[in-house]
Amino acid sequence: MPTRRIAWTNPLRNPLDKRLPRIAGPAGMVLFGVTGDLARKKILPAIYDLANRGLLPAGFTLVGFGRREWSKEDFQDYVRKAVEERARTTWNEHVWERLAEGLNFVTGNFDDDAAFDAMAQTLSELDATRGTGGNWAFYLSIPPESFADVCHQLDRTGMAEAKGESWRRVVIEKPFGHDQESARELNAIVNAVFPEDDVFRIDHYLGKETVQNILALRFANQLFDPMLNSHYVDHVQITMAEDIGLGGRAGYYDGIGAARDVIQNHLLQLLALVAMDEPFSFSPRDMQDEKVKVLRAVKPVEPFELTTARGQYTAGWQGSEKVVGLREEEGFDAESRTETYAACTVEITSRRWAGVPFYLRTGKRLGRRVTEIAIVYKDAPHQPFTRGEIGSLGQNAMVIRVQPDEGMLMRFGSKVPGSTMEVRDVNMDFSYAEAFTEQSPEAYERLILDALLDEASLFPTNEEVELSWEILDPILAHWAENGRPDEYPAGSWGPPSADAMLARDGRTWRRP
Ligand code: BG6
C-alpha cells in the first residue's frame, strides 16, 4: 500500500535537520484520554515544554475531551498540576498563562452525538478567536476499542475534513491492535476517515535522541556502516530492560504481555533502524520505504521452544527493596499467564544480513533499566597471536546505549602494558552528557512538534505496523498453545530459558 506523499524536496525542511528552529504554525489539538496516565505524565508536560521553548504558535489551543464535568478552570488546574509535576523545563509563569488561555474542555462520551456536535462548534469558535486557522490535530490517547467511535464522530460532524488550505490530522497511541488482523482492522477504521498521510502513529522510541542518532552514526560517518553486514557481524542483541514492575497497570497489561507491549513496536523499530539500507533521503517516504524493505525480510527463527523465551517475575529484591511477584500485584491474579519477559530470535533474509541472528529481549523487574543495541563482531579471520596471548580477548562489539547513560561504546582488544604480549578487552566510550551541553528533549516533545509540522519521518506507517505483527504473530500463537511463562525472580536477568536460548547458539547475553 502506498504510504507517505513524496512532496518533500526542500533540504531546509529536512525533518532531521535541527539547526533551524522548527516552529509550528497556527494550530490546535484535541486530546482524547486527558485523564489517562500517559496524558498526565508525558503529553501535557511535553506541550508545556514545547511552549516554553517557543516552538508552539502564539494562539496554540488545546481542547480536552472526557467524561468529567469540568469547567475551563478545572481543566486548567488539572493541566497545571501535570505540568508542575512532570515538565522537563523550568516553570515560567508567563508561558503558562499564555498556554492556559488556550485550554478548553468538552464533556462527553465517545458515543455521545451531542458532545461531538458541541466540540465541532467549539472548534469553529476557537478558529475565530484563537487564530488556529482550521488546523487541528486529534490526539487519540485512548484504548483502541474506542478508535471506531471517535473516528466515526469526527467524520459525522465534519471535524475530520480539512477545508481550503487548512489541515486535519490524527495522532494515535499504541497498542495498534493485538495481532496482524486486528491491526489491519484498526488501520482500516482510521484510514476510512483520515488518509494515511494525515495519520501519525506514535512510537515514542523514535522520538528519542539516541534512536535518531542511529541514523547519524550509520549514515553521516564512514567508520561504522561498512562493517554492518554478515561479513563482519556475528550477531546483534537488542535489549530493553526495565526495573519497574506492573503495579497499577493491570488494566492495560494483563493479557497483553511484554512482546505485544514493546517488541512489536519499539524493539522492531530499533532493529529496522540498525539493519535497514541507507535511505535515499530522510523524507518520510524514503525512510519508510527502507524500513518496510527490511521488516519484510525479518523472519522469526524456529523451533520456537528453543529460539524464544518468556517469563513472569516472582517476588524478589530490586536493589534493597523487596518487591512482590506479578501475580501478587494489584489487578493480576494467580492464573495470569501474561509474560513480563520476552525474548526471541529473528533473522533477516537479505544479502546484507543472511546468517546473522538478531536476539531481542525485554522484561520488567530486571536487574536494572537499560536499553541498548549490541552489535557483536566475528573473530578476526586469522590470528598471528598465540592462544595464550589472546586468551582474555572477547568479541569486538559496538554498543549503542539508548538509555540511560546515552552514548556508544566500542569494545576491542588492546595490548596490556608490559614486556610480554597480552591482548585484553578495553572500552572506548562516547557519552552524550560529556560531549554535549544541550539537554535532550523528551521524545514526546519531538513527536508532537513533528505531527504539528507534518513531518512524518519518525512515525511508523500502517504497513510497518502490520509487518511487525506478521513477525510476532507466529511466536505469540506458539506461546498461547504452550502453557505458562517460566518464572524469574525480580531483580534477576530473566528466566533460565532465555540464557538457554543463546547458549544453544554458543552465545551469551551481554550483562549491561
Ligand atoms: C511503553 C510501554 O511503550 O514504554 C511501557 O508500554 C514501558 O510498558 C515504556 O514501560 C518504557 O518507555 P521508556 O521511554 O521509559 O523506555
Image (spheres, helix red, strand yellow):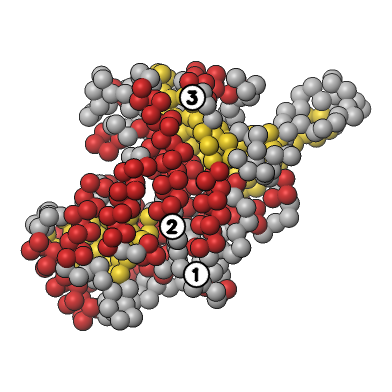
Measured from the top left, where is residue 469 in percent x and y? Answer: 41, 41
Lower sequence index among marks 1 and 2: 2
- Callout 3 environment at 10 Å: few (<14), some (14 to 19), or many (20+)? some
- 117 left or right of 80 in image: left
- Give the residue type at disc 1: Ile
List the residue tagged with mark 1: 6
Nearer the observer: mark 3 or 2; the answer is 2
- Callout 1 environment at 10 Å: few (<14), some (14 to 19), or many (20+)? few
Residue 442 in view in this figure:
no
- Callout 2 environment at 10 Å: few (<14), some (14 to 19), or many (20+)? few
The vertical placement of 59 against 359, above or below, is below
Lower sequence index among marks 1 and 3: 1
- 114 left or right of 301 in image: left
Lower sequence index among marks 3 and 2: 2
Which residue is drawn at the image coordinates 28% and 32% (left, top)? Answer: 254
- Give the residue type at disc 2: Met
The vertical placement of 199 against 320, above or below, is below
Which residue is drawn at the image coordinates 14% and 73% (left, top)? Answer: 121
Which residue is drawn at the image coordinates 38% and 29% (left, top)? Answer: 477
Q: Quadrant of the C terminus?
A: top right
Q: Which mark is residue 304?
A: 3
Q: Tell me whether circle 3 and circle 2 mark residues in contact (CB < 8 Å).
A: no
Helix, strand or loop under label 2? loop
Helix, strand or loop under label 3? helix
Q: Tell me whether circle 1 and circle 2 mark residues in contact (CB < 8 Å).
A: no
- 436 left or right of 244 in image: right
List the residue tagged with mark 2: 1
